[in-house]
Amino acid sequence: MSPIVDLAGRRGLVVGIANEHSIAAGCAAAFRQAGAELAITYLNEKALPFVQPVADALKASIVVPCDVRIQGQLEAVFARIEREWGRFDFLLHSIAFAPREDLQTSIVNCSAEGFALAMDVSCHSFIRMAKLAAPLMKDGGALLTVSFYGADRVVENYNLMGPVKAALESSVRYLAADLADRRIRANTISAGAIRTRAASGIGRFDEFLDKVRERTPAQRLVGIEDVGRVAAFLASEAGSALTGSVVYADGGFHTIA
């Protein structure tokens, strides 16, 4: 009998690995363990030494730069995939950014420019990726992105990223509806609080981790491996009944008032 999560013969693109501790790295490892062939992106040459060991461990077929703020780089990623693979089956979008001065101030004090940049990188880039991916998902496919509880509830010090992640979750629902006739699913993974490089920009994050641990039913924080298993499920045929959903991978934290 085949395993429930089987990605053998499937190809996927993972965007957002910063280092081995990234949520995207945990997801990529789960995809690979399930049998998928992967394409991996890295932000820039400064980031490459941290991403290349991860790509090597995953035996990634394609390793390519991608900074969605640089005109043409995102399109070049998909052109490379089309040239080398011709088609692919799933995509993980795990990127977010806000200028530090806008992230570390209250929502009423963030700048219009900072808010717009955070929305462009963290939300609209997923829509851009969906548009580029759809023609290459010739047999249907899965689009995944990563969100956080702060999209649904006010989380102290999460600030402008709360509305940005809320927009991302809403965009996923609309993409799921738009692309259903192509048999392309879109889902959000709402990951639990995990100590990553991206999280380091959130004020007093260590204190928040302690509070999350106390409120989680099993009093255990989730890890990137936990999120990865959920991502692999959603990318596989086992997750074919789910689209337009926010799937929580947070150990039940979101269920506790």
Image: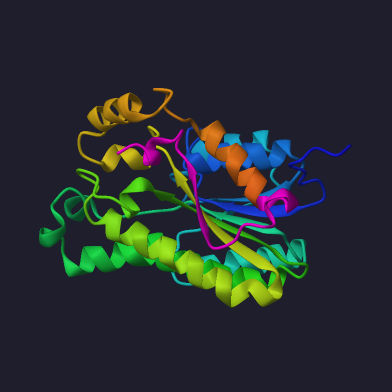
Percent x, y of residue 231: 60, 45
What residue is drawn where x is 20% and y is 34%?
204
Image quarter for residue 120? bottom left
Asked whether residue 255 is drawn in magenta, I would say yes
Question: From the image, which quarter does the N terminus lie in?
Answer: top right
**From this viewpoint, which residue is outermost toward the left?**
109
Percent x, y of residue 255: 39, 40
Percent x, y of residue 141: 69, 62
Using the rendered image of the protein, determine whether residue 59 is visible from the camera's viewpoint.
no
Q: Is residue 257 above or below residue 64?
A: above
Pick the residue in front: 192 or 160: 192
Image quarter for residue 171? bottom left
What residue is drawn where x is 60% and y is 72%?
132
Asked whether residue 71 is drawn in magenta, I would say no
Image quarter for residue 90? bottom right
- Magenta region: 235-257
**From this viewpoint, which residue is outermost toward the right?**
1
What residue is drawn where x is 36% and y is 47%?
149
Pick the residue in front: 51 or 3: 3
Percent x, y of residue 113: 21, 68
